[in-house]
């Protein structure tokens, strides 16, 4: 033979040959215990009487596969007459083993194998006395601590809402300014240029689309910052711990385990959360969970909270929004406890075993990806559902409620069918402090989607603002100057945001100039709520937020509930939510009045 | 014409491919398993005038038919009946990795057990009693650090010794024509 | 060993970390995962988490995602396991 060609040979030749196996090659076998061994031997004997099988498979191994019900091997055996008859005879033995152990026979062997390995590892592996504690474990000791874990989690959530409401406020103002300023001016100038100034087409775009969709798009920075914070928490591995903590919190209440999972999903969106109830085996648990899921505040409701917190609780917006979310959880827990003790008595859900991934530093790329995916889904919704609803609301506001009350697109807004219909329902909300037709109208359209509450408010109050504002003819538009203004505004917003970041932790490094000038829309809402609440606008605003938290999340969630639980439960859920929302808002408003708050 | 056929088996990420590369160098052939989209790597190496063909089996946690990889690995062991199975274990995750090793040994395949990732196990402060492990498994145990090619020479030597011992021994050796047929 | 794992799942009240269970039972985490997988295949333990089909949201008209397979609003949760109740009580009917 030729000289060695591999480097192993070369290197190997410089070293002494190594002694080979210390043991004589005896055949390896695990002792599966007397009963199982008897069965294995019996089957093995059968196999040894089948020559073709013996040739193809090692007999003991084949016997083990048969007892373990290996699907692939069973299929192959079934294919031949010899194999099929072997299986038939083997079944008798397997049955016997199953009876002895009171469980499937395959479990017996696998259990033994794992046990054998575990014993071997205990003998062979010596672990250090003081097992090395990874950084991840040390973090977990604090972050999932029985006592400290929950306060830390709540503090983290509070910081997230502080970030989304307070810190992004400058960007919100900036976009709001851009949309109501240059964008609207450009649109009006364009329509005048086209000779359509003052027509219904202009009104459709300006009062319908820009006021409605634009009013919702204003909240893009808010949602982006929420998604940014969530992406960081998710990618770092903390969200997994939060799920663990929440589950533990729910445990004494009997709402833990599998029924808790849809609730967590509900913070993102109620619709998949309702579908997620499918993992529960028990219909009773599915329905109960499906009834509670809508109280977990989904991200579509956030723009309403941010808008109202900015109007009525400037400076404390983060805390108020945090409180609203907590109220949703509390409502679900209380209702869950009541229902579990009455209509839905039954066993508690099985506990979760969770695989918590180690903590890691999130990558910018994945944070960006998650943030972007969610933000773009929000924008997608703005151009579809919200756009359609804005046009519908615009049309209803343009159609006069009867003869002699103006013509299409030339009616007093209060005479439109939208205002008239909303006005008819408004008394329902009067005891809650927000009995104006604008508020009731937005809550009605809000059945479609929660962002629509904001877009409708933008349209209804926006029309009022436009009507009271002096009708100035469009000034000559100067795009260059506008762009400079927009750019400068963005820079200013960034500076303001950076300045406000220390506020998250409660440090006020920069003296406040003054509270930001509320927009025309905001002061218009403020005035209207003050009027309908007898001067207690703050209480009425809070009651409105509570109402939005608790009533039907959106029409798709209703459809999902009907699909999963049937029409009866769907109506139970819709009516129950409305009743609960009304009662809670009533308690907030009237209770607040009694206590002399606001 | 190779004199022997051996297979590399192990859990995913146990270091099979690393060891495969260290053994074969450039003498590799990459294809697919017949009828599957799973990659098949085979290669050749020579030691003491012996030509050994080695096949890198797809990573599997068991030999039960739970995944295509497991079916491929099992069928290869059943049908091609390699002369030796080199079972690569992640020494830092011994308990899980041993499950496959035990199933391979239960199949009756002659085996060499490789404790790869010895460096990782060591950094975790684990000490492993090779001798005792070898006795329990009735197979030689070799320690390697695949990434640094440590222990590869010893592995080759052990593989070689096992192969010729089986040839000399009274053990049930395969008929010679099968060896030829295969290649 | 396998039975002990199932037993631990049955007896757990409140969430348990897989890592803690591994320490408690004296089983390496990787091996414990293999045992849990065994029970999942047997249908005695139910797995839920990413890619488990749990979040199979069957609607496209929610207006949010437009892509059934990837609802962006659902947070990525850890892999979770729970004992499967084999006798579903179907007492509540619509
Ligand atoms: N630290 C360390 N890493 C190794 C060792 N052997 C392989 N690796 C690394 O482990 C990873 C998986 O190895 P690979 O050979 O692809 O595993 P396979 O899936 O079994 O083929 C690769 O990144 C290797 O570089 C070793 O002994 N020590
Ligand atoms: Mg590989």
Image (cartoon, rainbow, N blue to C red):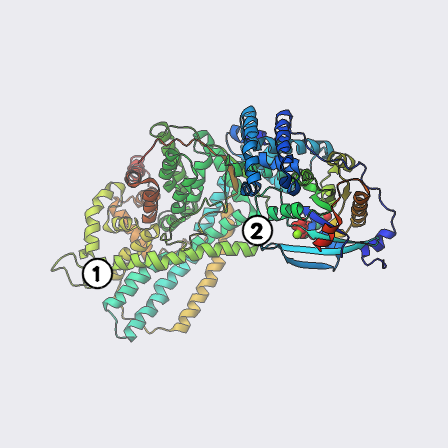
SS assignment at label 1: helix
Q: Residue at x 75, y 39 (%)?
A: B139
Question: How many marks overall?
Answer: 2
Can residue A141 be seen at all in this image of the molecule?
no
Observer-nearest of A461 and A2: A2
Residue A462 in the image: state x and y as whole percent.
29, 58
Q: Secondary structure at mark 2?
A: loop
B167 up-or-down from A373: above or below: above
Q: Quadrant of the N terminus of chain A?
A: bottom right
Q: Position of residue B98 (x, y in %)?
A: 67, 39
Q: Give the residue at x 19% y 48%.
A: A424
Horizontal arrangement in the rendering, residue A462 relative to residue A423 (left or right): right
Dot 1 crowding, Cα within 10 Å, few <14, some 14–19, many 20+: many
Q: Which quadrant is home to the C terminus of chain A?
A: top left
Question: At x 28% / y 73%, what residue is drawn?
Answer: A192
The answer to which image quadrant residue A571 occupies is top left
Q: Which residue is nearer to you in this view: A342 or A360?
A: A342
**Above or below — where is A193 with respect to A117?**
below
Which residue is the site of mark 1? A398
Q: Earlier in the sequence, mark 1 or mark 2?
A: 2
Distance in Å between CA atoms under marks 1 and 2: 50 Å
Who is closer to the viewer here, C31 or A578? C31
Which residue does the numbered mark 2 point to in the structure image? A362
Query: Which quadrant of the structure image shows residue A34?
Result: top right
Q: Chain of mark 2?
A: A
- Measuring 41% from the left and 40% from the top, which residue is drawn there? A278
């Amino acid at each position: 033979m030729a000289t060695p060609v591999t480097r192993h040979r070369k290197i190997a030749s410089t070293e002494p040959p190594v002694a080979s196996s210390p043991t004589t090659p005896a055949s390896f076998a695990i002792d599966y215990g007397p009963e199982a061994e008897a069965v294995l031997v019996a089957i093995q004997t059968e196999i040894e009487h089948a020559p073709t099988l013996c040739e193809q498979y090692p007999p003991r191994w084949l016997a083990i596969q048969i007892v373990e019900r290996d699907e692939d091997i069973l299929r192959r055996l079934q294919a031949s007459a010899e194999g099929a008859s072997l299986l038939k005879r083997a079944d008798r033995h397997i049955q016997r083993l199953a009876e002895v152990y009171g469980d499937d026979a395959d479990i017996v062997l696998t259990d033994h194998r794992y046990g054998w390995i575990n014993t071997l590892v205990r003998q062979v592996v010596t672990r250090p006395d003081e097992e090395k504690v990874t950084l991840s474990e040390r973090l977990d000791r604090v972050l999932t601590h029985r006592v400290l874990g929950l306060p830390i989690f709540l503090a983290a959530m509070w910081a997230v809402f502080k970030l989304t409401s307070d810190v992004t406020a400058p960007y919100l103002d900036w976009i709001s300014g851009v949309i109501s300023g240059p964008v609207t001016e450009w649109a009006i100038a364009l329509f005048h240029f086209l000779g359509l100034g003052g027509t219904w087409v202009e009104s459709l775009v300006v009062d319908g689309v820009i006021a409605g969709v634009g009013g919702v798009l204003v909240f893009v920075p808010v949602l982006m910052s929420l998604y940014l914070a969530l992406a960081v928490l998710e990618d770092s591995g903390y969200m997994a711990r939060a799920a663990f903590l929440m589950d533990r919190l729910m445990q004494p209440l009997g709402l833990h385990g599998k029924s808790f999972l849809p609730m967590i999903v509900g913070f993102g969106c109620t619709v998949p959360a309702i579908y997620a109830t499918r993992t529960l085996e028990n219909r009773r648990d599915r329905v109960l969970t499906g009834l509670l899921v809508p109280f977990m505040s989904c991200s579509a409701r956030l723009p309403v909270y941010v808008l109202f917190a900015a109007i009525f609780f400037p400076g404390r917006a983060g805390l108020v929004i945090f409180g609203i979310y907590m109220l949703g959880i509390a409502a679900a827990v209380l209702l869950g406890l009541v229902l579990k003790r009455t209509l839905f008595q039954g066993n508690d859900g099985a506990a979760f075993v969770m695989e918590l991934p180690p903590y890691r530093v999130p990558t910018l790329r994945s944070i960006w990806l998650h943030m972007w995916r969610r933000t773009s889904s929000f924008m997608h919704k703005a151009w579809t559902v919200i756009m359609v609803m804005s046009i519908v609301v615009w049309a209803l506001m343009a159609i006069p409620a009867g003869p002699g009350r103006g013509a299409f697109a030339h009616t007093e807004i209060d005479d439109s069918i939208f205002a008239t219909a909303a006005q008819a329902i408004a008394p329902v909300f009067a005891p809650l402090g927000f009995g104006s037709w604008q508020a009731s109208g937005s809550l009605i359209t809000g059945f479609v989607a929660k962002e629509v509450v904001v877009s409708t408010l933008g349209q209804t109050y926006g029309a009022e603002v436009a009507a009271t504002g002096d009708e100035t003819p469009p000034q000559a538009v100067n795009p260059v100057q506008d762009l400079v203004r927009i750019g400068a505004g963005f820079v200013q917003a960034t500076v303001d945001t950076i300045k406000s970041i220390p506020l998250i932790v409660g440090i006020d490094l920069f003296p406040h100039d003054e509270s930001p000038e509320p927009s025309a829309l905001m002061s218009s809402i403020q005035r209207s709520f003050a009027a309908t609440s007898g001067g207690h606008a703050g209480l009425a605003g809070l009651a409105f937020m509570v109402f939005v938290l608790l009533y039907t999340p959106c029409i798709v969630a209703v459809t999902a509930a009907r699909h999963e639980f049937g029409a009866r439960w769907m109506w139970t859920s819709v009516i129950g939510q409305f009743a609960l929302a009304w009662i809670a808002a009533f308690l907030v408003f009237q209770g607040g009045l009694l206590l002399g708050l606001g | 014409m190779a004199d022997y056929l051996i297979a590399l088996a192990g859990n995913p990420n146990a270091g099979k491919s690393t060891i495969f590369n260290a053994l074969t160098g450039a003498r590799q052939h990459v294809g697919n398993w017949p009828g599957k989209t799973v990659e098949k790597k085979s290669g050749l190496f020579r030691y003491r005038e012996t030509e050994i063909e080695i096949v890198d089996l797809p990573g599997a946690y068991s030999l039960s038919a739970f995944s295509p990889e497991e079916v491929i690995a099992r069928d290869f062991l059943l049908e091609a009946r390699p002369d030796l199975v080199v079972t690569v274990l992640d020494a830092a995750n011994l308990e899980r990795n041993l499950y496959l090793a035990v199933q391979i040994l239960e199949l009756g395949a002659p085996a060499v057990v490789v404790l790869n990732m010895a460096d990782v196990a060591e950094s975790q402060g684990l000490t492993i009693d090779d001798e005792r492990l070898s006795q329990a498994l009735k197979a030689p145990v070799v320690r390697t650090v695949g990434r640094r090619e440590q222990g590869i020479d010893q592995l080759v030597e052990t593989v070689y010794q096992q192969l010729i011992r089986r040839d000399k021994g009274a053990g049930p050796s395969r008929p010679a024509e099968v060896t030829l047929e295969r290649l | 060993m396998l039975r002990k794992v199932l037993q631990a799942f049955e007896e757990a009240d409140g969430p348990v970390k897989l890592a803690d269970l591994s320490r408690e039972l004296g089983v390496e985490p990787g091996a414990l995962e293999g045992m849990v997988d065994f029970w999942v295949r047997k249908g005695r333990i139910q797995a839920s988490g990413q890619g488990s089909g749990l979040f199979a949201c069957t609607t496209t008209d929610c207006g949010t995602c437009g892509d059934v397979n990837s609802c962006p609003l659902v947070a990525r949760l850890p892999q979770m396991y729970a004992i499967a109740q084999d006798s579903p009580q179907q007492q509540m009917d619509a």
